[in-house]
Image (spheres, rainbow, N blue to C red):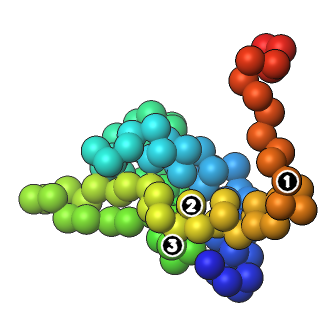
């Protein structure tokens, strides 16, 4: 993923409602969600949701598929993985930086 695409993706996620929509789609997994289900669960009007889905789609963070009479939206995992890879590239100067789960105090 190049820097320009990263900026667009981060900009799309930098809105509370778009972040909620994206997180809901991540939770839904490959099943995805219809706009009606998202409106109901997120408590947002259809027109507002449509605007935010368009922005997430433009940023490449969600996909849309027609299933019969419904649209189904899904998180674009390849894009989000590319975004995470870009952000963590050269992390810790090449040294392992993940915390050992056994030493984590939760």
Q: Nearer the viewer, residue 71 or 85?
A: 85
Q: Which residue is label 2 attached to?
A: 81
CB under 8 Å between discs 2 and 1: no
In the picture as drawn, the residue positioned furthest to the top comes out as 106
Question: Residue at 52% of width from left, 58% of height from top?
Answer: 48
Between discs 2 and 1, the one toward the N terminus: 2
Q: Is residue 56 visible?
A: no
Q: Residues within 10 Å of mark 1 (few under 14, many from 20)?
A: few
Helix, strand or loop under label 2: helix
Q: Is residue 88 left or right of residue 13?
A: right
**Residue located farthest toward the right when viewing the structure as drawn:** 93
Name the residue tied to disc 3: 60
Q: Nearer the viewer, mark 2 or mark 1?
A: 1
Residue corresponding to mark 1: 95
Mark 2 or 3, which is nearer the eye?
A: 2
- Up-down: is 2 above or below 79? below
Q: Secondary structure at mark 1?
A: loop
32 sits to left or right of 49? left
- Residues under numbered marks 1 and 3 in contact, where contact means CB atoms less than 8 Å apart: no
**Mark nearer the viewer, 1 or 3:** 1
Q: For the residues marked 1 and 3, what is the alpha-carbon distance in whole angstroms?
A: 31 Å
In the depicted structure, whether residue 81 falls above or below residue 58: above
Mark carried by residue 63: none
List x then y, in percent, for residue 37: 34, 41
From the top left corner, tell me how far across and down residue 56 is, in percent: 54, 66
Mark 2 or mark 3, which has the lower sequence index?
3
Q: Please, what secondary structure does the residue beneath circle 3 have?
A: loop
Query: Position of 57 compared to 3: left or right?
Result: left
Structural crowding at the residue carrying mark 2, measured as other residues with C-alpha within 10 Å and reported as few (<14), some (14–19) or many (≥20): few
Q: In percent of the image, x 81 and y 19: which residue is there?
A: 103
Q: Residue at x 76, y 67 (%)?
A: 89
């Amino acid at each position: 993923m190049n820097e320009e695409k990263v900026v667009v993706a981060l900009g799309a996620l930098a809105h509370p409602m778009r972040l909620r929509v994206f997180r809901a789609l991540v939770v839904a997994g490959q099943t995805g969600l219809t706009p009606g289900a998202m409106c109901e669960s997120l408590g947002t009007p259809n027109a507002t949701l449509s605007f935010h889905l368009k922005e997430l789609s433009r940023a490449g963070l969600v996909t849309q598929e027609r299933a019969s009479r419904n649209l189904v939206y899904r998180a674009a995992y390849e894009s989000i993985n590319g975004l995470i890879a870009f952000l963590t590239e050269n992390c810790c100067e090449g040294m392992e930086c993940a915390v050992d789960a056994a030493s984590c105090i939760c």
